[in-house]
Amino acid sequence: MSKSPKRTPRSASSPSRSDRDRPEWVEGYHFDAAAADRPCQFVETLCRVPSRDGGPAEPMRLIEWQRERVIRPLFGWKREDGRLRYRRGCVFVPKKNGKSFLMAAVAQYLLCGHAPISDVYLAAVDRLQAREIYRVVAKFVSASPQLSKLLEVIDSKSLIRNRDHGNVLRCLSADAYRNEGLNGSVIIDEIHAHKSDQLISALTYATRATPNGLILAISTAGDNRNSVGYQWWSDAELVSVDPRSNPSFLGVIYAADPEDPRGFGDPAVWREANPSMGVTFQEDEFAADYQDALTNPVKMGRFIRYGLNVWTERDNRWFHGDEFTRCRADPPEPLEGRPCWVGLDLADHDDLTAAVFLFRSADGSFDAELLAWVPEESMIEREKKQGIPYSSWLRDGWLRVTEGSRIDQERIYADIQEVLEGHECRGVFGDPWHLDWIATKLQSDGVDVHKVRQTIGYLTGPSKTLEDLVKTQRLRYRSPIMSWCANNVCIWTDPNGSIRPDKAKSSEKVDAIFALINAIAGASTDAEPEGGEFTLYPL
């Protein structure tokens, strides 16, 4: 059974002058310099950084901010009875500043150098991320000759065991957590990504009985101010101003100030927000990232969040300002008789339905002609409640209305056929949802119809092509409904940089954009002879 920490004889009511000089000072606590140095000595003596090119591992060297702002305060500040002052800590720092190194260093110390010896938990938002952070720590342990003798890496169970004491390091994820008895300390990876505080709260309360148990979150800023991550950010901001507001919580934030008059493009702002600049990455690399971000609002949002650690609003709109509107123009040459690809996005009974006829010019630019339909009853109701200018679009010829409360597929089929009579149709491409009836009708007329799976794997190619066409203004369109849908559409990006428009997150109807992407997919493909599906190729 672990022993309780010994009582420190020194009175915390009589702090030294050096204690008072520290920014974390609060009356009733004292700073133990020897205890603060112990984890630093452990890390720089025993821990090793794995080589990326297969060479020998290098001794880990703590960066000044990691040493002085995080590790020494966490383990140096004590209560009157000798226990750690801090029960919780949170470090918010931009990416590329050595977050993984810091996490691995603290984890190894907690596992075999921190008293009393107890278990360590790595908490992640999902199983995949939990596995990734385990691999980080396991690589650091394996790189150290001394620690690899003391600690057993059990890769099959994603577990690291202290051979002498039997305590373990294990991963927990929000999507797999079960309320079991826990005893130890916790490191939370990317707390901003946790949608619920269920796992965080459970860990906080479950480890409360552990003497000197510590919960440390290391994260970048997020985009959801209703999240548990933002609650911890707010706590960190509060104690940064006044440590007395929550003496048992250590908050460390490195971030740009959105209201700083110098702006996000000032190198001085970059350096202040990135304490590891010049060590883990160079300023010229950061400057190149900033220049690249200037070309695209989506990229700039990521740069501000990940590079400067600024919380962004949950506005994931794909196109901002007049970026898409600048592409609105008449075709430079007549479209009659030219080949075209047709993209469909069919409504679920009472919504907007869109068909885009896409024409490619010899210079690689495109003209997109939109047909849009809406049921009459739905149009009246939505114009009244949401103020959408359906009547104006109808009057100006941009919108077609079908009778009743449900979309009329017979009318849509007839209108599409009328347009196709004047063109060479290279194929119709649409979401498989609701496509079967109209596909059968068109195929009976000799039109090739292909299904476009609405998954990120199928939509990334044409979505990125659309981004490029808009950016270079090689897309032209005329319909104001296309502009409206483009202003509504939000984008979803996965960790690999793949993208697709996101109907669920979009503020209003986006059907015209989905129909446009389906048409671009058609123009970018060679149809397979069977199965009605295709393989993407770049334009």
Image: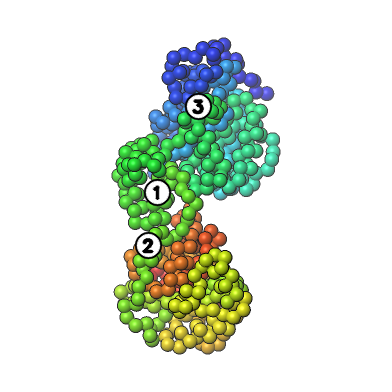
Residue that sits furthest to the front in the current view: 384
Looking at the rendered image, the quarter that the N terminus falls into is top right
Left or right relative to 249: residue 360: left
- Mark 2 lies on a secondary structure that is loop
Q: CA distance from mark 2 to mark 1?
A: 19 Å
Viewer can see residue 288: yes
Residue 259 position in % (x across, y down): 39, 42
**Within-10-Å neighbours for mark 1: few <14, some 14–19, many 20+:** many
- In the picture of the structure, the residue carrying the numbered disc 1 is 303
Residue 386 position in % (x across, y down): 54, 65
- Mark 1 lies on a secondary structure that is helix
- In the picture of the structure, the residue carrying the numbered disc 2 is 323
Along the polypeptide, which appears first: circle 1 or circle 3?
A: 3
Residue 165, above or below 375: above
- In the picture of the structure, the residue carrying the numbered disc 3 is 243
Residue 408, above or below 141: below
Residue 96, above or below 23: below
Going by the numbered disc 1, the residue's amino acid type is Phe
Q: Nearer the viewer, residue 340 or 150?
A: 340
Q: CA distance from mark 3 to mark 2?
A: 45 Å
Task: State the residue at coordinates (65%, 23%).
Answer: 2
Residue 311 position in % (x across, y down): 46, 45
Going by the numbered disc 2, the residue's amino acid type is Glu
Residue 507, above or below 35: below
- Mark 3 lies on a secondary structure that is helix
Task: State the residue at coordinates (45%, 88%).
Answer: 421
Q: What numbered label is drawn on residue 350?
A: none
